[in-house]
Image (tube, helix red, strand yellow):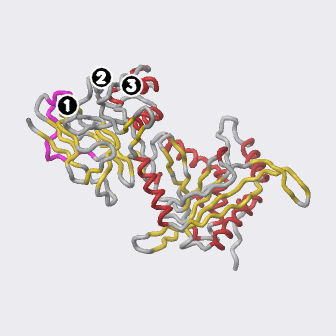
Amino acid sequence: MSQYVFKMPDLGEGTVDAEIVAWHAKPGDAVTEDQIIVEVMTDKAAVEVPAPVSGRVVSITGAPGDKVAVGSPLIVFDVSDGAAADGGAGRPANVAPDAPKPVAPTGAAKTGGVAAASAPAASMPAAAAAPRQGRVMASPANRRRAREAGIDLSTVAGSGPGGRILRGDLVAAQSRPAGADVSAETSAETSEIKVIGLRRLIAERMSEAKRNIPHFAYVEEVDVTELESLRLHLNLSRPAEAASLSYLPLVVMALTKVLESFPQCNVLYDAERGVLVRHRAVHVGIATQTSDGLKVPVVRNAQSLALWEVAAEIRRLAERARSNKATRDELAGSTITVTSLGKLGGIASTPIINAPEVAIIGLNKAIERPVVHHGAVAVRRIMNLSSSFDHRFVDGYDAAAMIQALKELLEHPAMIFIPKVKSK
């Protein structure tokens, strides 16, 4: 038997190890060159790793949630003649494999076909369906359910069109006799879900941000009646089939203008060097909720974009993030973040800073209510801005002044589009 030992590749940017998120191959499987065999996650990205050769899997290293060091054996193939699914012997062991495919950066991993991998010597229970080759067909929501339940999708018989796995198939799979190799323990009263992949990364980053950054929270009430009027007018000027303009692009436009006067808030803190890196360009992170967790795609050089360009870019990036097509560059490099819960925005919130940034702006729900306006009670559209600042580097006065400046632009939205007059 001729063996090919494939080691955990160097995924770049100082990566020293990677977490196993999901296996798509197990001992005994015949795989072909370039077939996705495993998904791993670093602190920077989720990566789909293809098979470097054609052959039969002899052993694998690590189960979902385990970390494997770069350069350590990851998977062993039998590349003898006849071992491969296509009968080929695969690539010689001294030929470098193709580079892994990054699919989603920090806070943006998606587990495509989730498999709860066992140790190399483990075998599937008799009650399970025979493992299928290649990627299985299932919706992102069902992949997430499978991950949380510790179900190996390759062992589930799909009842949908073309063998697509439906929610009922997962329910049936969960009722299998004990003995299946899963990543969660379940009883009649409780269930234990192993925290891996994106959820682990989110937990670590949120804990680190709250532990290391002294947050200064500031909430301000904004009258967005005129902003709403402008938004509706602009939407009416567009073709009926065009996407509707939301508050978010207008807030981003206003924010880029405000940051001209508050450059200390458009900063990244390099803790290792003890240096604040102030940016001239404004790269706005847009916190986006997806079926796999929170992702932050980045509108780059927002200060140089027109309103409809900002709107189109936000929409494009959100769609790519939700469909797991966003690249590493699209999900990294923001200098300040804007977050919005839309209709669920509530009265106020305390957003957590997206380190190494020093500021985050949150949009709450806009509602009509009676207020005193020009000395009389009137119905106005009101929205709160909830913000957090790194109090080590942004003083409370500056934070409040910045939000007040943003408030002024949003309450008088024509000012957003008037060039700033430079003093002589």
Q: Is 364 above or below relative to 270?
A: above
**Magenta segment includes 169:** no
Q: Amino acid at mark 3?
A: Ser
Q: Quadrant of residue 358?
A: bottom right
Residue under pointer 2: 127
Numbered circles on residues, count: 3
Judged from the image, the secondary structure of the residue bearing numbered disc 2 is loop
Marks 3 and 2, how far apart at CA: 10 Å
Residue at horizontal 59 percent and vertical 46 percent from the top: 312
Q: Which residues are magenta?
A: 83-98
Quadrant in which the C terminus is drawn: bottom right
Judged from the image, the secondary structure of the residue bearing numbered disc 3 is loop
Residue pushed farthest front?
Answer: 189
Q: Are marks 3 and 1 in contact (CB under 8 Å)?
A: no
Quadrant in which the N terminus is drawn: top left
Image coordinates of residue 14 in percent, x first then y, are: 32, 60
Q: Amino acid at mark 2?
A: Ala
Q: Amino acid at mark 1?
A: Gly
Dominant secondary structure of the residues highlighted in magenta in the image: loop
Near-viewer residue (114 or 310): 114
**Residue 25 appears left or right of 113:** left
Q: Residues within 10 Å of mark 2 (few under 14, many from 20)?
A: few
Judged from the image, the secondary structure of the residue bearing numbered disc 1 is loop
Residue under pointer 3: 175
Q: What number is the disc on residue 155? A: none
Q: Residues within 10 Å of mark 1 (few under 14, many from 20)?
A: some
Marks 2 and 1, how far apart at CA: 18 Å
Marks 3 and 1, how far apart at CA: 25 Å
Residue at horizontal 86 percent and vertical 57 percent from the top: 372
Image coordinates of residue 408 in percent, x first then y, are: 74, 63
Residue under pointer 1: 28
Q: Earlier in the sequence, mark 3 or mark 2?
A: 2
